[in-house]
């Protein structure tokens, strides 16, 4: 019998918390449901669930209730202590916890969520991690990789398929958002160092910030109206916003990857 592949990656801090990934999960329910419904095996991996399994438990509950009752979520962690600690929360076959890294324990999932995992890696490691992860996806599979703050009020994630990145989503709790510039601190690893002049993501954050200032008058009607006018304004300027006002109302914005892709991929030798 062949030995299981050695887990690939570097254990990092396990910070997590209830509902931290609610925004990302709700977006996944809306945008990844078709892939999950079409999958021969509704296998989902929560990669790097952290010190407690709470976000994996929540992901399973949300997907089972709103997309597919027979979804099977596997939480994978590099840290064996975290794998052991999660076992009381297991509910097989719908939810199990095991040791694994970017190689996904040789599983072939329809969907992978990797939240706040790459943040503590070097930017030069992102492309390799993405390639390893997407190389493991089942046909038609998707990867959602991104970051959020500790309470899940600000988040940003990239949607990828086997061909590479498709889109970037920014998401904020509007009632506590002071300005869209706050989202810059939560960009996924591939973009967080690219919020500098000359990079498209920097232009995007600036455009949002300017539009947010211009839309200050709408704050009287609530932060949702202000955000709606902000997103509509940058769309009028030519930013190719993918989603509809129904999603903007939730404090979201999704944009095709080519519109904000870094100009020059960094290489380990840089
Ligand atoms: C900051 S926690 C994130 C927990 C949870 N996903 C969240 O967002 O609340 C990051 C976790 O990812 C794990 N991790 C880091 N690299 C990994 C890899 N290559 N494969 C699996 N887990 C990894 C770390 O051990 C850590 O527990």
Image (tube, rainbow, N blue to C red):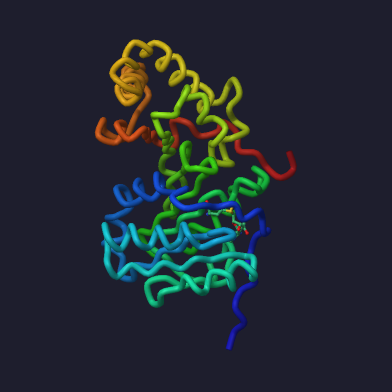
Q: Is residue 56 above or below residue 179?
A: below
Give the residue at the far right of this rendering: 269
Nearer to the camera, 175 or 95: 175
**Quarter in which the C terminus is drawn:** top right
Residue 225, relative to residue 5: is it above or below?
A: above
Which quadrant would the N terminus be assigned to in this image? bottom right
Residue in the foreground of this view, choosing between 2 and 143: 143
Residue 53's x, y, as percent? 51, 63
Residue 264 x %, y %: 60, 33
Q: Residue at x 50, y 43 (%)?
A: 151
Query: Which residue is the extreme one toward the bottom?
Result: 1
**Residue 221: quarter of image:** top left
Number of numbered tags placed on the structure image: 0
Ligand 1 rendered quadrant: bottom right
- Could you tell me residue 123's position as x and y percent? 64, 43
Name above or below for residue 208 compared with residue 67: above
Identify the residue at image location x=58%, y=54%: 129
Left or right: residue 175 compared with residue 9:
left
Whether 93 is drawn above or below 24: the answer is: below
Could you tell me residue 225's position as x and y percent? 29, 22
The one nearer the camera, 140 or 253, is 253
Residue at screen point 29% across, 48% down: 30
Which residue lies at the image location 43% right of the left edge and 21% below the top edge? Answer: 208
Horizontally, residue 49 falls left or right of residue 30, namely: right
């Amino acid at each position: 019998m062949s030995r299981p592949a050695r887990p690939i990656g570097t254990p990092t801090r396990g910070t997590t918390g209830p509902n931290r990934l609610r925004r990302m999960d709700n977006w996944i329910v809306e945008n990844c449901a078709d892939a999950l419904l079409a999958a021969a095996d509704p296998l989902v991996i929560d990669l790097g669930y952290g010190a407690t399994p709470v976000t994996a438990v929540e992901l399973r509950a949300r997907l089972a209730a709103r997309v597919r009752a027979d979804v099977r979520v596997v939480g994978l962690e590099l840290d064996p202590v975290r794998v052991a600690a999660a076992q009381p929360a297991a509910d097989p076959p719908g939810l199990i916890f095991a040791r694994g890294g970017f190689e996904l324990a040789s599983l072939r999932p329809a969907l992978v969520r990797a939240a706040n995992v790459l943040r503590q890696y070097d930017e030069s490691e992102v492309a390799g991690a993405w390639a390893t992860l997407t190389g493991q996806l089942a046909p038609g599979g998707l990867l959602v990789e991104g970051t959020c703050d500790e309470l899940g009020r600000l988040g940003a994630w990239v949607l990828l398929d086997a061909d590479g990145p498709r889109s970037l989503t920014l998401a904020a709790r509007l009632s506590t958002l002071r300005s869209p510039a706050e989202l810059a601190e939560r960009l996924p690893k591939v973009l967080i160092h690219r919020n500098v002049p000359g990079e498209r993501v920097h232009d995007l954050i600036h455009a949002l910030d300017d539009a947010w200032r211009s839309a200050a008058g709408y704050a009287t009607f609530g932060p949702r109206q202000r955000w709606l006018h902000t997103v509509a304004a940058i769309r009028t300027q030519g930013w190719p916003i993918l989603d509809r006002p129904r999603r903007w109302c939730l404090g979201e914005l999704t944009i095709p990857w080519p519109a904000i892709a870094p100009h020059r991929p960094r290489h380990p030798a840089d």
